């Protein structure tokens, strides 16, 4: 009988330990969620501005490879930023490494580039629409075409 009580005691101890561990984990997760929720209210204007600045026009999805017309050659819209986060250039290509190497070789402003980003679109037409929208909206410092302050090439 003593052994039975000893086994039941140990089982109860294990159950209580596991229950407390789970409760502590739930409490910790709830605490983190609450902290992020509070911070989101504090920084909501900054977050909204960042989303407007970095998002493609409405109706476009990031990193899509398939389109309704089938498989298309993916085309990238890329952005170059300086150390202060200012947008320097928006471009379009289907070969990022080749295009970025071309910029590095022939652009006098290349030394200002501190950050490079790209978004892939399923068709070139969609990428061209996004590129034009972002150039007209954000007016990057070194874009000539569609920028409004310098006439397009050709």
Image (cartoon, helix red, strand yellow):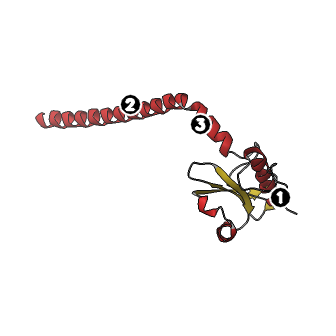
> Alpha-carbon distance for marks 1 and 2?
49 Å
> Alpha-carbon distance for marks 3 and 2?
27 Å
Check disc 3 and report the residue beneath it: 47
Asked whether residue 115 is in view, the answer is yes
Q: Residue at x 19, y 33 (%)?
A: 9
Residue 23, placed above or below residue 91: above
Label located before the other in sequence (3 or 2) = 2
Q: Nearer the viewer, residue 123 or 99?
A: 99
Horizontal side of 142 relative to 20 (left or right) equals right
Horizontal side of 52 relative to 133 (left or right) equals left
Q: Nearer the viewer, residue 50 or 19?
A: 50
Residue 3: horizontal and vertical position, in percent? 13, 37
Q: Nearer the viewer, residue 153 or 91?
A: 153
Q: Nearer the viewer, mark 3 or mark 2?
A: 3
Residue 82: horizontal and vertical position, in percent? 60, 53
User: Image quadrant of residue 75?
Assistant: bottom right
Asked whether residue 99 is in view, the answer is no
Q: Nearer the viewer, residue 89 or 150?
A: 150
User: Image quadrant of residue 112?
Assistant: bottom right
> Alpha-carbon distance for marks 1 and 3?
35 Å
User: Image quadrant of residue 63?
Assistant: bottom right
Label located before the other in sequence (1 or 2) = 2
Check disc 1 and report the residue beneath it: 69
Q: Nearer the viewer, mark 1 or mark 3?
A: 3
Check disc 2 and report the residue beneath it: 27
Q: Across the whole image, how many numbered discs are drawn on residues?
A: 3
Q: Helix, strand or loop at disc 3?
A: helix
Quarter of the image with the C terminus in it: bottom right
Residue 66, placed above or below residue 57: below
Label located before the other in sequence (1 or 3) = 3
Q: Which mark is residue 42?
A: none
């Amino acid at each position: 009988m003593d052994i039975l009580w000893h086994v039941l005691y140990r089982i109860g101890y294990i159950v209580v330990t596991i229950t407390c561990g789970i409760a502590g984990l739930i409490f910790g997760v709830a605490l983190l969620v609450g902290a992020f929720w509070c911070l989101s209210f504090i920084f909501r204007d900054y977050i909204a501005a960042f989303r407007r600045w970095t998002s493609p026009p409405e109706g476009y999805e990031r990193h899509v490879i398939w389109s309704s017309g089938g498989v298309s050659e993916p085309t990238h819209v890329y952005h170059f930023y300086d150390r202060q986060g200012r947008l320097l250039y928006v471009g379009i290509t289907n070969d990022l490494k080749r295009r970025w190497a071309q910029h590095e070789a022939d652009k006098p402003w290349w030394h200002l580039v501190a950050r490079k980003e790209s978004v892939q679109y399923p068709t070139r037409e969609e990428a061209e629409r996004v590129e034009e929208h972002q150039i007209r909206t954000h007016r990057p410092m070194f874009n000539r075409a569609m920028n409004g302050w310098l006439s397009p090439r050709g």
